[in-house]
């Protein structure tokens, strides 16, 4: 950063259309700029377990993320609370869309009644599934103002429009400073837990410590 601020702009090399963590990455990096950058690792340097903590906290708060509509299981299936598995069911692919939807809905409704689960009220669904596609066509650019971070890192030779964006970026950065502190409190607890766990289980696979693949 002392010589060339752009060396910190790792997101320029990422096509976020193929990922689901852009909002978490953006707000993490924005909040990180409340501190000297060398104090906390950049988002792309977090290991798997830490990445998941950031994703869940920041995507839920800033991007309206919600649990996925459906889950595809590879290998052993884990039944999540409030999800249903319809075993031994096959579908006639030559039937009409309406007929298939009607029968599927009847199965869903029967399972809801059995469990005492009500349908969400209209307008309450909200949010986006983690696997919702990013339809933005600009490489590496989803719905986030990455230019904000670049202006904060290199606030020189700015136009009046740039100065306006920089002011907004700094204001938002200060606003989410406490979120970043709470986030790192949780990451700290996560690291302490892993230290104890792997010390007591030296042969366990240390998946949570593996780097995220980019």
Image (cartoon, rainbow, N blue to C red):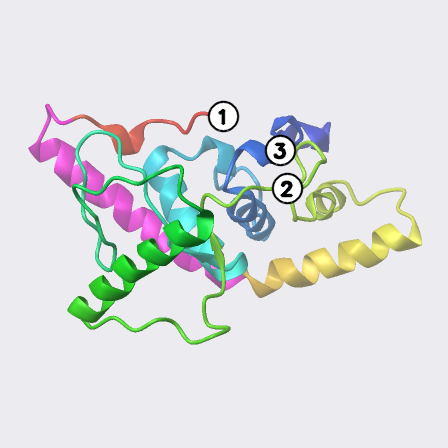
| The N terminus sits in image quarter | top right
Question: Is residue 105 depicted above or below 147 in this figure?
Answer: below
Question: In the rendered view, does 66 fall on the left or right side of 160?
Answer: left
**Residue 94 appears in which quarter of the rendering?**
top left
Q: How many marks?
A: 3
In this rendering, position of residue 179 left or right of residue 113: right
Q: In terms of secondary structure, where does tag 1 sit?
A: loop
Q: Label 3: few (<14), some or many (≥20) within 10 Å?
A: some
Q: Look at mark 3 in the image and give the residue it sits on.
A: 11
As drawn, the label of residue 151 is: none
Q: Position of residue 87 (x, y in %)?
A: 17, 44
111 w.r.t. 193: above or below: below
Q: Which mark is residue 135?
A: 2
Q: Residue 134 falls in which quadrant of the image? A: top right
Please provide percent x and percent y for residue 45. 46, 31
The reply to whether callout 1 and callout 2 are in contact (CB within 8 Å) is no
* SS under mark 2: loop
Pointer 1: what residue? 214
Earlier in the chain: of badge 2 and badge 3, it is: 3
Along the line of sight, which residue is nearer the eye, 23 or 196?
Answer: 23
Q: Residue at x 84, y 54 (%)?
A: 163
Q: CA–CA distance between discs 2 and 3?
A: 17 Å
Marked residue nearer the N-terminal end (1 or 2): 2
With 57 as the anchor, is 33 left or right in this view?
A: right
């Amino acid at each position: 950063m002392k010589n060339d601020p752009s060396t910190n702009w790792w997101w320029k090399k990422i096509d976020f259309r193929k990922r689901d963590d852009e909002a978490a990455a953006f707000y993490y990096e924005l909040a990180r700029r409340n501190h000297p950058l060398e104090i906390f690792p950049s988002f792309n340097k977090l290991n798997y377990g830490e990445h998941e903590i950031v994703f869940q906290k920041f995507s839920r708060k800033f991007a309206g993320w919600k649990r996925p509509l459906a889950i595809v299981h590879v290998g052993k299936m884990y039944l999540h609370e409030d999800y249903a598995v319809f075993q031994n069911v096959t579908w006639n692919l030559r039937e009409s869309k309406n007929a298939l939807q009607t029968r599927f809905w009847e199965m869903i409704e029967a399972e809801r009644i059995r469990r005492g689960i009500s349908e969400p009220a209209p307008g309450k669904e909200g949010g986006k599934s983690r696997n919702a596609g990013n339809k933005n066509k600009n490489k590496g650019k989803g719905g986030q103002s990455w230019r904000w971070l670049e202006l904060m890192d290199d606030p020189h030779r700015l136009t009046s429009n740039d100065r306006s964006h920089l002011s907004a970026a700094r204001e938002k950065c200060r606003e989410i400073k406490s979120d970043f502190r709470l986030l790192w409190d949780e990451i700290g607890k996560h690291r302490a837990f892993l230290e104890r766990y792997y010390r007591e289980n030296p042969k366990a696979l240390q998946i949570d410590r593996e780097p995220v693949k980019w």
